[in-house]
Image (cartoon, rainbow, N blue to C red):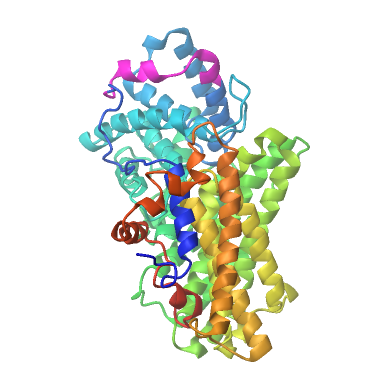
Amino acid sequence: MDYSGSIPLWQQWKRLFDIHASLGVKPQDTILNLVPTSGTDGSVSSLLAIIPGDNECRILVNRFLGSVNEVFPIVDRSIFEDEIHAFLLDRASVSHRWLALLAAILALGYVVPVLPLVDGGYARRPDRAEPLANLAQQHAFIVAASYHRNHLATFQTLLALIVFKNSSFGWVDGNNGIAGLLGLASRQVFTLGLHCDPSVAVEALSDEVSSIRRKLFVTYVRLEYSHCLESGMPFLLRSSDFAVLPITPDHQADFMHLFPTLSRAVQLTHSDRSGLPESEIKDLLLSLQSTATWVQRNHHESTDPVHILKLSIQSSINALALYRTHVALLALLLEQDDIHLRSRLCSDMVTPALSLLDTFGTLFDTIEEHASAESIKGWKLLVMAFVRSSVFNAMSYLLTFLSRSLADPSLLALRGSSHAALDSAHVFRKIRLTLRRCTCTLDVSIQCVKENVAYSAYLKSVEERYRLFVEKGLADIDLASEQGRIVMESLGQTMNEMLDLAEEALQQNQITLPLDILHKPTDKSDSFNDLSSGEQLTLMDDWDWPWYNSLPEIIWSQSAM
């Protein structure tokens, strides 16, 4: 059966499926994915067999230490460098738990290409990373789930695996094991006593041990907070639950300074029965607004490009967390039926989202200015692994706000006083530029392709609504009309342009991807056209892709978010 005339954007659907096929079929990546692969069983011998040669091992460790570990500290650099030196001298001298930690770190090194490998290449190598991560996960999961109190190395492995799964660019709400690993990590935080400040330990701890324990606690809190904020899971940690005070004045200490405000705000976003009076919510919004200036201040001056780059990433990720939390509260406020409530609680519902996009754009500009040409993509992917969902949520919020403002003039008074917030065309340009920056992820996962295609179409749909409102005074449109057909063709063209970029990006990444399917999908047995109509529709449902059937509601409904 031919659905091309009855289902919106059917041709774009077909192209998206064929891109999905080109990326290859991969089993669900879950926390329980413990089935041995290629004869491996998670033993010491299996781990040793998969660890690469000395030179590549050093490069991968240096990639991790100079990038991921600078943003989310997992190991003490000097201590781990000594440990890796000893390991390379005698590979049989290390414990099983440390070897699992090394495997997780090497896996991260393969997906953060900020330094060249032995062959001189900068490409991401998930094909080499995933076997290492799977073996590390087998060990960490079994040990963490079997014992009340584990060694610190097992907790570090859990954190490294959480970061690795973030770097796989999957669906933030998907079954990729992050929530489960964070659940295990949350128990380890308390059984290992990481929630207590090292200064109150029964036996005095060395400065090195005290420092890494503090850093690990903050890293866990930041990963947990970010996941809850983006996935909608309740964030249950309160300031009264711990007594850890970071001593070093760095980005970790800055986050903990923000934590009381951030935690109160994020807990409100997933609670319909918070019981907070309006005055407290208003104070919370004002606190988020006033803190925005403080969080992006510069601690240090430097002339070293790499140092400037790392400082920028550290401070920007904190700022993005703050703005994203503010946007989450404003999105909740936007959903309220009481239009007077919004004006009582705040006067500017646009600037925080614009500030998030500005911060993201400035950070990407800094990367392009200070990173070596070959490593720019690697640094951008490192940033996107942690802020991608925040950026897309901010764009979605702005587009929803603008769309609703056509039917609800009261929102026009809540756009602040800045020229940027008052100029809809400026907002559209800023979102389009942000989407262009996000295309750096097009070749890493099907989820990134779907996000880029979907949000490009969403932007186009709101722009079309504004055009029709200005030209014809229409706040809505019947998609079955001639004007509606023209609009749908425009959306299809926009989606095709992004799909073209995705195919081009995949063609340039020929190391691990079979790309011949992209050119003639109808000649392949695994193409969209070779599936029965029922299978095609089932695949659409499984992908949870928003355009099938619900496209008119998503684009034109006054109530759809």
Horizontal side of residue 16 vs 376, given as left or right:
left
Along the viewing direction, whichever of 285 and 548 lies nearer the viewer: 548
Displayed quadrant of residue 112: top right
Asked whether, in this view, residue 78 is left or right of residue 95, the answer is right
- Where residue 456 appears, as percent x and y from the top left, is 58, 63
Of 96 and 427, the residue lying toward us: 427
Measuring from the top left, give residue 532's x and y in whole percent: 31, 56
Measuring from the top left, give residue 53's x and y in whole percent: 49, 14
Most common SS among magenta residues: helix
Which quarter shows the N terminus? bottom left
Name the image quarter holding residue 540: bottom left
Q: In this view, does 193 lie to the left or right of 463?
A: left
Q: Kindly identify the residue that appears in the image at 51 percent across and 17 percent down.
A: 82
* Residue in the image at 35% along x and 32% along y: 134
Position above or below: 287 against 343: above
Does the magenta segment cover residue 55?
Answer: yes
Q: Which of 418 and 237 is in front in this view?
A: 418
User: What count of labels does the image hold?
Assistant: 0
Residue 99 location, x and y as percent?
Answer: 38, 22
Compared with residue 320, is residue 394 higher up or lower down, i.e. above or below?
below
Determine if residue 234 is in view.
no
Q: Is residue 464 visible?
A: yes
Q: What stretch is highlighted in magenta?
A: 41-58
Residue toward you, 207 or 536: 536
Residue 302 drawn in magenta = no
Residue situated furthest top in the rendering: 89
Q: Which residue is at the far left?
A: 146
* Whether residue 75 is situated above or below residue 219 in the rendered picture: above
